[in-house]
Amino acid sequence: MAPEGKNHFEEIEKEQKIINRGLVRFRKRGKEKVKSFLDFYRDSQKGPSLPNKFRELIRLCIVVEEGCKPCILKHLKLCFDAGCSEEEIVDAMIVLLSMRGGMVYEYIGFVMESVEYIKEKKEV
């Protein structure tokens, strides 16, 4: 990947760190309501029927549809951490494309470039 491409991903990772700092502040101010949401979120991470890698693929599809680049990068890493293969990620993007069409096509390109970035960083 060209150096300018890496810089783009590094900027997105910096943006995620800023978001995370803001969320820490939000959790402190939102207290019980935010805690309730996070408890629900954590509880949704597990379940008897769906393996975690499928949950992560679903989350990836949702953030690709939303067009949130920091979220795409984060959930793509979580997909790999959950044991997803590149083939499974591509298959999920094909399903997403079949349902949402051109609205997500450009972001799927970002997903594929993110895969290469993560591989180069040896995070897979």
Image (cartoon, grey):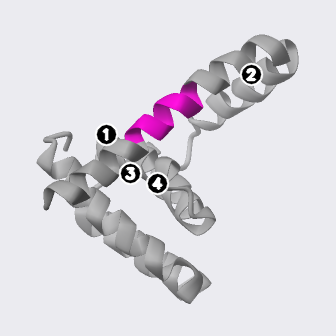
Q: Earlier in the sequence, mark 2 or mark 4?
A: 2
User: Label 2 to label 3, Cα distance in Å?
Assistant: 25 Å
> Residue type at mark 1?
Asp
Q: Which amino acid does label 4 sit on?
A: Ile
Q: Which residue carries the number 3 mark?
A: 76
Q: Do the residues labelled 2 and 4 touch (CB within 8 Å)?
A: no
Q: Is mark 1 on a helix, strand or loop?
A: helix
Q: Which of marks 1 and 4 is in front?
A: 4
* Of the image marks 2 and 3, the number of the one nearer the N terminus: 2
Mark 2: secondary structure: helix
Q: Is the magenta stretch mostly helix, strand or loop?
A: helix
Q: How crowded is mark 2: few (under 14 residues within 10 Å), some or many (20 or more)?
A: few
Q: Please tell me whether mark 3 sits on a helix, a strand or a loop.
A: helix
Relative vertical location of residue 66 with respect to residue 39 in this rendering, above or below: below
59 relative to 30, above or below: below
Residue bearing mark 4: 72
**Mark on residue 106?**
none
Where residue 92 appears, as percent x and y from the top left, is: 42, 70
In contact (CB < 8 Å): disc 1 and disc 4: no
The answer to whether mark 3 and mark 4 are in CB contact below 8 A is yes
Check disc 3 and give the amino acid type: Leu
